[in-house]
Image (spheres, coloured by chain):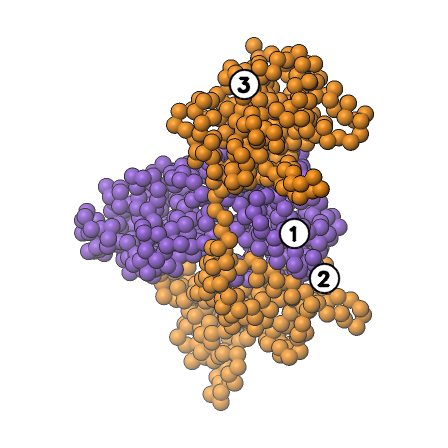
Amino acid sequence: MRFVKVQTFDQWRTEARRLLLSGVPPEQVAWMADEEQLSLFDSNGDVELPETQAAFTVPKAFLELAKIVACHRVATRWSLLYRTLWRLMHGQRHLLQITTDEDVDALMTMRKAVTRDVHKMKAFVRFRKVIDSDGRDVYVAWHRPDHRIIRLAAPFFSRRFNGMHWSILTPDESVSWDQTSLQYGPGVPVSDAPDDDALEELWKTYYASIFNPARVKVDTMKREMPVRHWPTLPETSLIADLLHTAPERVAAMVAQNEGFAETAMHYMPERIDLESLRAAVLGCQACDLHQHATQPVFGEGPPDARIVLVGEQPGDREDLDGRPFVGPAGNLLDDALRQAGIRRSDVYLTNVVKHFKFTEPTTSRGKRRLHQKPNAREVFACRPWLEAELSLIQPVAILCLGATPSQALFGRDFQVSKHRGEIRATDWCDRTMATWHPAAILRMPDQRRRTEMQQQLVADLTRIHHAHPPT
Amino acid sequence: MDVRDKLAILADAAKYDASCASSGSKSTRAGSKIGSTEGMGICHSYTPDGRCISLLKILLTNYCIYDCQYCVNRISSDTPRARFSVDEVVSLTIEFYKRNYIEGLFLSSGIIQTSDYTMEQLISVAKKLRTDEHYGGYIHLKTIPNASQALIQEAGLWADRLSVNIELPTEGDLQKLAPEKKKPQIVDAMQGIRQKIDETKDDQSAGLHPPNFAPAGQSTQMIVGATDTPDVEILRTASQLYDGQNLRRVYYSAYSPIPHADARLPGQSPPLVREHRLYQADWLMRFYGFDASEIVAEADQNLSLDIDPKLAWALANRHFFPVDINCASREELLRIPGIGARSVKRILGIRRHKHLRSEDLKKLRVAWNRAKYFVLTADHNPELANLDKADLRKRAQPQPKQLMLFDTRQSALTGEV
């Protein structure tokens, strides 16, 4: 029996080569674990094995495997490697491919353990920033790997954190990077590592916020992030608390869950024509506006109109009368239509939102109903009515009055001030244009600007009036 | 509001984004001082929901002018809002990265002002990281719907991966729930990215050195369960995206993040199991040679929730079996329930040197309790007698308890079936 003591892969390689060349079978070699002392019966010197350069080739895959397995802590690794080498060189050249073989299976399992450990080191090293005596930022981490892998993992850190000064300390060995080369040193106890970094509070905030309390899978977490690594991972101090409060957070999520908004689709009549729609809209409760408005105000005009004008929503007068554009803004629009040479009875007038939205502040003259802009929820809920009107009429041109109808038809980031008067294609009509809302003109305090906007409204109406269907 | 408060809101708002991958960029950008990408992604931590933390996944802002019904950040929701400055995101990314907390940044945003303005903000985060900080780590930018093609192209210069969300499986679903997003626009954006990626690759193989363009490719995300579109439609859409746009990944995200019981599967959460089944089916299309149309065996056009899609296919196509483990082709081996792509590779290696018996398959750690009904081995396999029996489904079906262990995020990662 030969006793051989090796500590590193290179030593094993040298010894294994000599033994193999001397024809020493694996059962005659006792590979000593690193910590063991050579015993009194050490017979290593009995026979001088030849220092030979004689060449034999080992499959490259085996060498790569052996380098990794050598980092495993288990004492039997050297003998297992030598036995496998022996078998490879004695008629079983393809041994490594037969992963069902007991030795190969054991090697593969060890390799998996080591590569997993390297991977976990890459994942779980947590640097803490300290200032060194030269005033430089240095990043220091303390990590406890399962195997002796620091030399396998260090090159990765030097590539990734190339522009930093850093050290990784482990109980067996430590390594530092000075932006040029890796220096290895002795192991370091955890008490020598820095114990805090102000940034960890932010990291913990992130960890707590990205956690979804509705899916608790503690086993998966522990399998992937083994508990033995928790002491060096700052975020793990939150886990108990996160799990404890998860049920109440889920209850809050359920309570706040808004679900899908209801829309007017729910209230559509079976037959889709303008008269049925006008009757059906009376029962619409898709949003809350119906609660305070007098009545819904549906569109008005010939079902085969060439032009559709779309406003935002009915105003105070419209709400009382049940017809669109009959208040002060309607008067202004009537003037503009006349100037553009359009008969009001030839166009179809409607609004994106069918109910009046208002606030009712008490003023010196008593209560007054003040127009309020509809919000996205209300526009979304009401939209199917407008879409039904447009798909029935199929106008040659659509003119949107103001921002609300323009954004409903052109998209949410459409700006009337930038793109007023441009004719564009939309899903509903190849000639869709946006212009000022008459109410916006009425509210304009600057007289000169008001006149200008009024002229622009007339000009836009005129252009739309002369728009021709594509031939 | 300080950075910590913003981080709490904007990480919370991003947590329903399914994508977590940080892989795919094979080499680190030239000139980088901090950060590397070497092909494989790393999970740096795990939260108690079993999901990995690989990237700093945040929104630039959760203010949004859109009103997409399935989204927590829609304008009409009363969720708390916040907005990061560009510099705040740059600094958070770098400081987290230097401490080895993360692999990189996943940045998305609600839409503020206009699509183009928002996209410009995202680009300037990525550009600053690359040029001012010499950052070489991973960046995934989510493109903003309706942003101009020129901006998307610029984003690709700085990002490793770009994604354009398809959002919902069909055009009709989009009209219903996100009328402001249009399928043609979404597909055009993907097409533009694809072309640019192809051009860059062509230039590279011609020996030129074109600037980087999204070296980790593009991905997308689809919300499932928000409409009643069946799985077969979802898989068809995914298959078109894989073939037509050369996507690296399609992520499926259950509409409801909240598990609730359902009569079909007592004590379990159908949205999450469905998500898991879709990932398995997705894997079958990409790595197992299955076609979208043959995966769904059920009459209602949805995947079975109680058994995995490969087993379901095998049960519906028993004439295909038994498959002889020692002489079947790779394609045939891949169709055996319980045997994954990795095991198939090993089987092909081993059988050149010896005949495989059932104990060998067990040693390879295939799911023998499923595979055993479908394979011929060198020894006698008595379980084959059950292949044509009526109760095979019941025998091969895993115990309901095991289903509880399914982790959909894990299946997003591996999808092994």
User: Which residue bears the numbered disc 2?
Assistant: A164
The residue under the point 42% across, 52% down is: B272
Instruction: Look at the numbered disc 1 and give the secondary structure of its residue.
Output: loop
Q: Are marks 3 and 2 on the same chain?
A: yes
Q: Are marks 1 and 3 on the same chain?
A: no
Chain of the residue where label 3 is placed in the rendered structure: A
Callout 3, which amino acid? Answer: Gly
Chain of the residue where label 2 is placed in the rendered structure: A
Chain of the residue where label 1 is placed in the rendered structure: B
Q: Which chain is purple?
A: B
Frontmost residue, A113 versus A137: A137
Q: Which mark identifies residue A301?
A: 3
How many labels sit on residues? 3
Instruction: Pick out the residue farthest to the top.
Output: A471
The residue under the point 54% across, 24% down is: A299
The residue under the point 51% across, 66% down is: A245
**Image location of residue A71, percent across then percent down:** 53, 69
